[in-house]
Image (tube, rainbow, N blue to C red):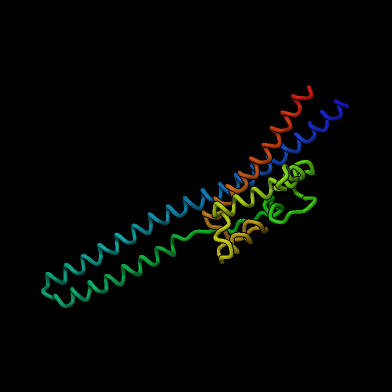
């Protein structure tokens, strides 16, 4: 009988490894896209700064030339125009700097946690039972703790807000248009879930040593 228990522990350990590997890949994929968008935004910031500097220099040259020619009124008008242009450039740069990316995840492990169920098509049975089985008299499960943590830390936005509804649809759905912040949040949530599954692996190891 001891051998049968050890066999079951070994199989469950393989389930842990498989799940952690897949979660790790999804986390890395989110981080990779977020890093790429961050680099793109930095490039755009440098280009936007260049445009602003060139615009200021051009306005200064024109105003100075008009002043030397004794045309104070024209110089003042140019200064006003320069302010309008600078504001326009600033607004354009703000739009220019917004970067997002279509990011899809049809196999979304976070979706499974958002809607508790008896079985999950994405998690091995042993791992899923570990996540949704209450561990004490309070009835709380690891899944409950993760959802509360994400809500408390603000990763899902302010409860009831438009941003929260948008983010829940994005993070717990099949994907959509992500910005860098949303990608980082997804990566962090996957990391928390991965840590919970790794804890299962540690519990299995402790049980195995007790039986040896």
Q: Where residue 129 sits: x, y (%)?
A: 77, 44
Identified at 58% across, 65% down, the residue is: 160
Q: Where residue 29 sits: x, y (%)?
A: 60, 47
Above or below, 200 against 106 in this view is above
Q: Where residue 188 sits: x, y (%)?
A: 58, 47
Identified at 60% across, 44% down, the residue is: 28
- The foreground one among 32 and 2 is 2
- The foreground one among 188 and 152 is 152
In the rendered structure, the answer to whether residue 55 lies left or right of residue 123 reads left
Q: Where residue 60 sits: x, y (%)?
A: 21, 65
Q: Quadrant of the N terminus?
A: top right
Q: Picture quarter containing residue 164?
A: bottom right
Identified at 61% across, 45% down, the residue is: 27
Above or below, 182 against 193 in this view is below
Above or below, 158 against 131 in this view is below
Q: Residue furthest front?
A: 137
Q: Picture quarter containing residue 155?
A: bottom right
Q: Residue furthest bottom?
A: 73
Above or below, 15 against 175 in this view is above
In the rendered structure, the answer to whether residue 90 lies left or right of residue 74 reads right
Q: Residue furthest right?
A: 1
């Amino acid at each position: 009988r001891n051998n049968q228990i050890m066999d079951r522990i070994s199989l469950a350990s393989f389930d842990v490894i498989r799940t952690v590997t897949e979660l790790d890949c999804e986390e890395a994929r989110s981080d990779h896209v977020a890093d790429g968008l961050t680099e793109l935004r930095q490039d755009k910031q440098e280009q936007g700064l260049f445009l602003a500097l060139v615009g200021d220099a051009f306005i200064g040259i024109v105003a100075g030339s008009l002043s030397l020619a004794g045309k104070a009124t024209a110089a003042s008008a140019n200064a006003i125009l320069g302010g309008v242009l600078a504001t326009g450039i600033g607004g354009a740069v703000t739009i220019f700097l917004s970067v997002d990316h279509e990011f899809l995840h049809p196999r979304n492990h976070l979706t499974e946690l958002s809607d508790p169920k008896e079985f999950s098509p994405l998690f091995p049975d042993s791992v899923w039972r570990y996540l949704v089985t209450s561990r004490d008299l309070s009835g709380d499960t690891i899944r409950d703790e993760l959802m509360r943590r994400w809500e408390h830390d603000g990763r899902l936005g302010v409860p009831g807000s438009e941003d929260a509804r948008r983010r829940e649809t994005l993070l717990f759905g099949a994907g959509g248009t992500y910005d860098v912040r949303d990608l980082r949040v997804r990566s962090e949530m996957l990391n928390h879930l991965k840590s919970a599954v790794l804890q299962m692996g540690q519990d299995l190891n402790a049980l195995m040593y007790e039986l040896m």
